[in-house]
Every structure is written in C-alpha cells, then in structure tokens.
Image (cartoon, rainbow, N blue to C red):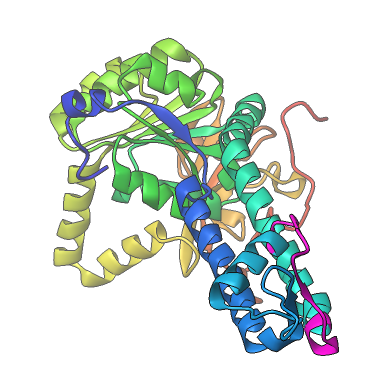
C-alpha cells in the first residue's frame, strides 16, 4: 500500500484470513436483540396496564373485589411469565377485550421474544464455527488465482483492470498488513490475508503456492524484492509482476524472480514529459491506460481468416506480434505474414462501435498452433 507500514512493524501484527462481507460483532448482535426484547416487554407491560381492569389477579382478589387490583408490578410480573411461557395462571385475562389482545398481540410478541432469545444464542455460538467453515471451503476451492500484495493505489488499479477484463473477484486474494487496506478490500468484495508479505506463513495462507499470477506493489522497493524472492521460492511457476519505484532496483527485482517489472516512477515521469511536450500525446497515452472508454491495448488470438496476411491489413491496429514466446513489432520482417499460433497485441476501441469492429469478440474461429 502507498502508506504501508515498514516490514518490522507489520511483522508484529498477527496474520489472519478475512473474507469479504464479514458478519458484525456478536456483541453488537446481542445488544441489538436485547434492545428489541426489552422493547417487546415494555410494549406488553403498557398493553396490560392500559386494559388492567380486564385482568384477574387471584392473589389480590377479595370478596369486595373478585378481580383484584393489577398494578404496574403485577403487569411486569404477568409480562415476564407470559413472554417466557412460564404461565403461573395467578394473573389471567378475563374480559373479551383482554383475551383478544392476548390472542392477537401478546401471543405474537411472545413468539418474537423467544425467536430473539434463541436466535441470539445460536448466532453467538455458531458465528465462529461458520466463519471457520467459510475459510476452510475457500481454501479448498482456491487455486489458479491471483494474489495482489499491497492494496494501495497501484494494487486497487491492478485489481480493477483484472476484474474489468473478466476475472472473478472470488479469484483475487489481497495481502496487506494495513487495517485500512482490509476495510477497502472488503468493500470491494475481496478476500484479504492480513500480515507481512515477506513471511512464508502469510503467503501460504494466501495460497501463493497454487496461484497463477502474483502482483507485488508495496510502497518499498526492498519489501518488493524480498516478497518476490519468497514468492518465487514458494511457487517456481507463477507469473510474477512487480512494481519498483527506482530504475536502479529493477535488475535486482528481476534477479529475485519477477517475470515483469514496472518502474512506477519512470512510467509516471515519461507520461508527464510526453504531456509537457505534447498535451495531445499525453491525452492519448492516458486514454490507452484507462479501461472502459476510448481506446484500449489488448492481446488476442489470431483468427483463422487472418492467417497468412500482413499485420497492417487487419481491422485492428496491430502494434506487436507474439510468436514463439517472443514479441516482434508489427513491422519486423519476421512477422511479415501472420502464422498459426501467433498472438496479436492491438489497439482497439474499448467498446465496439458500428464503424469500429472488435475482431475476436464474436465467437470467431481461432487459428491455434496445433490445428491444420
């Protein structure tokens, strides 16, 4: 994260897994339900006092007053024994009105009161077990996912780009020690492992060993280097993308095992320089980097109809061709004619327009290398 604490401070915090949509505290649930229970009791006491002449108190009954006098204390007593279904019977409704109120108001209140008590007990007892079950199920199904280390500005932008290009949020795990990052990732419906990403146990909890891709973007280059080393040891086959602030640290992080290194300070500086030299060019570059509007840069497979034709003749603006794991510029003599197995890096409309088609997005037949 851009304001991520140092590794030493982060290492002191315990590591744990937190899934999104976390339930509220059991004490909050208990307090809310107790308030509701007291409200039901107070309402019932009020109803009994309003119609106290319709009740018979056997304990206070006399020859002169066979019904007895139902006081406030009697009303509280009657309410507690009635709502708790104890029902001693010494105070009972005798008038038609009091009996109707008991049948259609106090009885539903009694049911609601019992539901509140039982529900609170079950909630407090089962919440921890349910959370453990959710985490166990998450671990069982979590593989071939993406781990994002550091959920600051760069990390959030990376996740947004992945999600906007079709990745399910359930296949993204964030690793960050910051409580702010935890809250923001939960708001974005992402699973979070809180802790220091340079520690093996934290990365194991995030499922790094079974992840397909790891994005490392903390605020410190030394943290990125150490996290890259640790990730590469846990997963030799994962594709690691790491960000560094300074150009001089790029070779070090590549040697640590990163497959792709983004130099954030240089990238921002180049964009600033281009914008100063040509505001129009800066606007176009920003458009290419912004998802969902205007232009976008994308990689797609070659279509059958495109085999054997020059890259310049395609509807898409081809800027590079990927062949045999190597990247060639569209004007390179090696890729004068496109062949099966090629992949194209193109500039195309972010949203298809009638006059600007997007080949490869209409279930066309792809020219894979093993065909023909």
The answer to whether residue 11 is magenta is no
Where on the picture, by quarter, is residue 82?
bottom right
Residue 362 horizontal/vertical position (percent): 75, 58
Residue interval drawn in magenta: 83-99
At x 38%, y 52%, the residue is 184
**Nearer to me, 87 or 171:** 87
In the displayed structure, does residue 152 sit left or right of residue 131? left
Q: Position of residue 80 (x, y in %)?
A: 63, 62
Looking at the image, residue 362 lies above or below residue 8 = below
Residue at 33 percent across and 60 percent down: it is 285
- Res 177 → quadrant: top left
Residue 293 seen in the figure: yes
Q: In this view, does 360 lie to the left or right of 18?
A: right
- Which residue does the image show at 70% across and 48% down from the upper left? 306
Q: Where is residue 365 in the image (x, y as percent from the top left)?
A: 79, 46
Q: Residue furthest top?
A: 233
**Image coordinates for residue 22, horizontal then vertical, percent:** 51, 47
Q: Decide if residue 26 is on the left or right side of residue 110.
A: left
Q: Would residue 346 be seen by someone viewing this image from the given angle?
A: no
């Amino acid at each position: 994260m851009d304001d991520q604490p140092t590794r030493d401070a982060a290492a002191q915090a315990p590591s744990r897994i937190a899934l999104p949509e976390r339930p509220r505290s059991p004490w909050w649930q208990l307090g809310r339900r107790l308030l509701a229970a007291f409200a039901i009791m107070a309402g019932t006491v009020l109803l009994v006092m309003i119609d106290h002449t319709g009740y018979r108190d056997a304990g206070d009954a006399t020859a002169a007053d066979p019904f007895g006098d139902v006081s406030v204390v009697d009303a509280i007593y009657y309410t507690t024994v009635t709502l708790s279904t104890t029902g001693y019977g010494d105070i009972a409704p005798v008038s038609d009105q009091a009996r109707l109120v008991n049948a259609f108001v106090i009885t539903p209140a009694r049911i609601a009161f019992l539901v509140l008590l039982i529900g609170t007990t079950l909630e407090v007892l089962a919440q921890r077990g349910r959370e453990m079950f959710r985490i166990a199920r998450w671990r069982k199904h979590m593989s071939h996912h993406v781990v994002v280390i550091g959920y600051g500005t760069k990390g959030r932008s990376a996740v947004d780009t992945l999600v906007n290009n079709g990745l399910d949020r359930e296949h993204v795990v964030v690793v960050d020690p910051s409580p702010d990052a935890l809250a923001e990732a939960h708001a974005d419906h992402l699973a979070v492992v809180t802790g220091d990403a340079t520690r093996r146990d934290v990365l194991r909890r995030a499922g790094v060993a079974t992840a397909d891709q790891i994005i490392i973007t903390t605020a410190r280059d030394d943290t990125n280097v150490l996290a890259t080393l640790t990730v590469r040891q846990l997963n030799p086959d994962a594709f690691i993308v790491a960000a560094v602030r300074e150009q001089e640290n790029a070779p070090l992080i590549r040697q640590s095992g990163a497959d792709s290194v983004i130099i954030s300070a240089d990238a921002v500086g180049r964009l600033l320089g281009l914008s100063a030299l040509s505001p129009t060019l800066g606007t176009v570059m920003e458009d290419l980097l912004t998802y969902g509007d205007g232009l976008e840069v994308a990689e797609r497979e070659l279509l059958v109809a495109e085999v054997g034709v020059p890259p310049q003749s395609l509807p898409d603006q081809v800027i590079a061709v990927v062949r045999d794991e190597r990247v060639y510029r569209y004007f390179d003599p090696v890729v004068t004619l496109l062949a099966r197995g090629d992949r194209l890096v193109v500039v195309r409309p972010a949203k298809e327009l009638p006059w600007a088609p997007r080949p490869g997005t209409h279930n066309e037949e792809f020219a894979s290398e093993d065909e023909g």
